[in-house]
Amino acid sequence: MVQNKSLLMIAALAFTLSLFAQKTASELPGPGTETVYSIAHVKPGMETRYAQLSAKTWALYRKLDLVLPLPHVVVRGMDARNLPYFVEIFTWKSADIPDHAPAEVRAVWQELEGACEKRDGRPGIDFTEVTAVAVK
């Protein structure tokens, strides 16, 4: 379980970093932004619904100009117990946005959470702030 999940996470991070490597310094996330890595522990049978809600959420973020357009990576996998999960990496334009999200964003977050479950002592959707690293 851990090995497959780790490999998928490494692949997602490598892909994201390759996007950063193609950008100039002025296009990379800067001070005040917040890059996040999330794992959504999706309930079995809810994968299609979660993917639809995730796309809806991303479109809303872009419409409200809350996120940088790149990087944005979404990958899907199955753990060793054959339980579905999604990994997403993106950057908020401001680290304050998640704590002060508009009501329409919070409403979609509730829908996303409804498609997920706590797993292995972790929340349904588990967010971690990460730092993008580009090697030139």
Image (tube, rainbow, N blue to C red):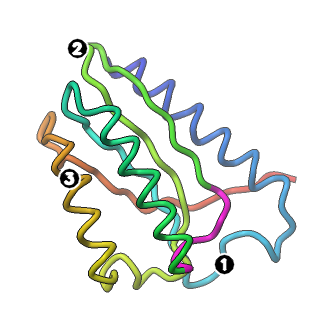
CA gap between label 3 and label 2 equals 21 Å
Q: For residue 62, which quarter of the picture?
A: bottom right
- Expressed as whole percent of the image width and height from the top left, the position of residue 115 reads 20, 43
**Image point (33%, 72%), residue name:** 105
In this picture, is 1 found above or below 85?
above
**Earlier-in-chain disc, 3 versus 2:** 2
Residue at numbered disc 3: 113
Q: Amino acid at mark 2?
A: Arg
Magenta segment includes 67: yes
Q: Amino acid at mark 3?
A: Glu
Q: Main secondary structure of the magenta part?
A: strand
Q: Amino acid at mark 1?
A: Gly
Q: Residues within 10 Å of mark 1 (few under 14, many from 20)?
A: some
Element at label 1: loop
| Depth check, front residue: 82 or 45 | 45
Indicate which disc residue 30 carries. Answer: 1
Q: Nearer the viewer, mark 3 or mark 2?
A: 3
**Image point (67%, 40%), residue name:** 15
Magenta segment includes 69: yes
Q: Residues within 10 Å of mark 2 (few under 14, many from 20)?
A: few
So how many labels did they put on this image?
A: 3
Q: Residues within 10 Å of mark 3 (few under 14, many from 20)?
A: some
Element at label 2: loop
Q: Nearer the viewer, mark 1 or mark 2?
A: 2
**Image point (25%, 38%), residue name:** 41
Say left or right for 31 vs 34. Answer: right
- Expressed as whole percent of the image width and height from the top left, the position of residue 126 reads 28, 51
Say left or right for 67 vs 102. Answer: right
Residue at numbered disc 2: 81
Element at label 3: helix
The magenta stretch is: 65-71
